[in-house]
Amino acid sequence: MKKIKQFWAELDEMTTISKRELFLGITACALAGIVFGVFFGPKKRVMIASNNGNGCACGDSEEKEEESSK
């Protein structure tokens, strides 16, 4: 508990940091926020191209259509 109080008292001191340190600190916080949001954000199912048949070279869909029309 003494270490925590000592650390808390040290936070009141004025310090200066370089612009590089400030930039790196802000960048680290932003990247940590992105990672946190990816892992703990609401899960959504995203389907790209929605399987609408574009680029289907196998011909399976044509065979299914012929079978269903018979």
Image (tube, rainbow, N blue to C red):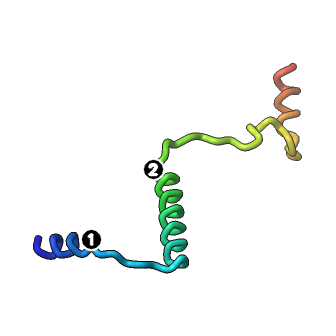
Percent of width and height locating residue 40: 45, 50
Residue depicted at x 52% and y 53%: 38
- Quarter occupied by residue 16: bottom left
Identify the residue under disc 2. 40
- Distance Cα–Cα, label 2 vs label 1: 33 Å
Image quarter of the N terminus: bottom left
Q: Which of marks 2 and 1 is in front?
A: 1
Q: Answer above or below: position of 65 versus 10.
A: above
Percent of width and height locating residue 17: 45, 78
Q: Which amino acid does label 1 sit on?
A: Asp
Q: Answer above or below: position of 68 versus 24.
A: above
Identify the residue under disc 1. 12
Q: Judge left or right: residue 2 versus residue 65.
A: left
Residue depicted at x 47% and y 56%: 36
* Mark 2 vs 1, N-terminal side: 1
Count how many numbered circles sit on residues in the image. Answer: 2
Mark 2 crowdedness (10 Å alpha carbons): few <14, some 14-19, many ≥20: few
Q: Which of 47 and 9 is in front in this view?
A: 9
